[in-house]
Image (tube, grey):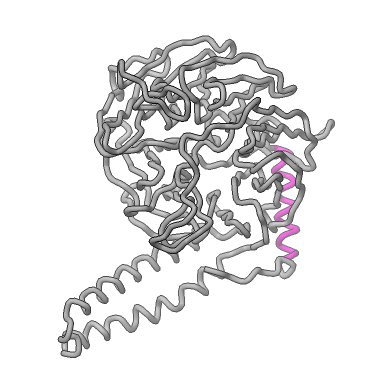
Amino acid sequence: MNLPLRDSNRSLPLVLTLLSLTSVAELRAPAADWPTYRGDNRRSGVTAEAIRVPLLPAWTYASPTPLQMAWPGPAKWDSYANLRRLESMRNFDPALFVIAVGDSVYFGSSVDDAVHCLDAKTGAEKWVFHTDGPVRLPPSWHQRKVYFGSDDGNAYCLDAALGDLVWKRKPSGEENLLLNDGKLISHWPCRTGVLIQDDIAYFGASLVPWEPSYLCAVDATTGAETGPGRYLEKLEHFTMQGAMLATQTRLYLPQGRQQPEMFERATGRAIGGFGGSGQGGVFAVVSRTDEFLHGSGQNHGSDGEVRGFDANSRDYFVTFPKAKRIVVTEATAYLNTGTELSGFARARYLEIAKHQAQLQAQHKRIKEALKKLGDKAKESAGEKLKDDLKPIEAELATVPPQLAACYLWRTVADCPHDLILAGATLFAGGDDRVTAFATATGKVLWSAAVTGRAHGLVVANGRLFVSTDRGTIHCFQMAAGE
């Protein structure tokens, strides 16, 4: 849906009031850690920490050799849908994604098959732990330990301060390894990362749908596989890849080219998928009001998209065409496409979108019923169905203006690779650049050059970390005295 850009000056008094309130809130917002991928187990990309711009470069880490992604990029051309400029649906490891806790930064590497710990102030290496395969997702930090998965098929737990091994678990057991991009990996690599919740470590081991997969829940402290809430489920027809998500009762697993799946967290029981065939992608968020938003990548007939579902019932309610990233708060959602960044009233927009989805479902059912009637569609039964369509079509025509009215602002922005929210500032990743925007207006507040596409953004303890596809990690920090 292409909507006109709105003139934010028309609401300038309200904007100034919001900015004033924001400044007060920023003074009270404490520094915070970023202990797992996208900040929390819902992968929200949101922190309450306010970081003031402009920021100054502090240090840069550079990979000694190029990164090695698990999967090659997308096909050059989708002949079925006649689409070009495709995007990958399995790009869960395009950069050295980091987490940051206290004065330490942690990341996994596909270059040297290791997890690294750096000093957050200087970028100096504190320790490195090598595995027998690429580490494609960042660790998770929990109670002075870090947890991660490797292509060698193991999930690992290390002492966060020293890098010493605490435990490791390989659900597939002994096996003959597979040659992949010049390295030997497991037939069941751990490409979901390790998620920690309620002192249980969750992870998956999977590669291709014609081989079984493993969904595991073990004791986070000891790695024990037995006890309440712990299990090792052997599953068929899954390709678990990309960071898993969790709520109090559910686990959510992206699958790349396949639709994401939902599981019962307490037992590992599969509940069902979101969407249909081809509706994959590894980007996903579960909002605090239990909307499951996922997608990006390429689907037939689109340039990528983010789709919205009820996180419990799996009912579909909205599609954001060409969307790459979305950040959701209680009041506002922020949407990032390849060309535009926008903010809209979340609750109202989703209310309208859900009603639109219901109308569209009714419309589809009636159309299908008419089609089944064939030549009899001109008879009384068919005329009745046509009459039923008229008020639905009339109401559907009123929806686009209602959705457009929900937008608070829209601004041109060429920064599609990542989007996070820190206090009242949005940070977006682009090609060779990271940019900060004001949440109240969409105004550009600050921008800085980086090396490569900025796929990973983290704000923690007064610093901004930017990870790029060139294997660099840039650290920016507030000026002295801020």
Judge from the rendering whether residue 360 lies leftward or rightward of residue 131; answer left or right.
Answer: left
402 w.r.t. 14: above or below: below
Q: Tell me where residue 249 appears, x and y as whole percent.
A: 34, 37
178 w.r.t. 50: above or below: above
Q: Tell me where residue 109 appears, x and y as whole percent.
A: 55, 26
220 w.r.t. 65: above or below: above
What is the tally of numbered marks visible in this picture? 0
Please say whether residue 27 is one of the residues in the magenta stretch. Answer: yes
Q: Tell me where residue 415 appears, x and y as whole percent.
A: 65, 51
Toward the viewer: 42 or 347?
A: 42
Q: Tell me where residue 194 appears, x and y as whole percent.
A: 44, 27
Task: Say if residue 288 shows up in the picture.
Answer: no
Toward the viewer: 454 or 440?
A: 454
Please say whether residue 25 is one of the residues in the magenta stretch. Answer: yes
- Image point 56% across, 25% down: which residue? 111
- Image point 20% across, 75% down: which residue? 369
Toward the viewer: 164 or 381?
A: 164
- Image quadrant where residue 57 sits: top right
Magenta residues span 11-28
Quarter occupied by the C terminus? top right
- Image quadrant where residue 480 sits: top right
- Image point 25% across, 35% down: which residue? 269
Task: Say if residue 428 shows up in the picture.
Answer: yes
Judge from the rendering whether residue 396 lies leftward or rightward of residue 209; answer left or right.
Answer: right
| Main secondary structure along the magenta-highlighted residues | helix
* Residue positioned most to the right: 481
- Image point 79% across, 42% down: which residue? 54
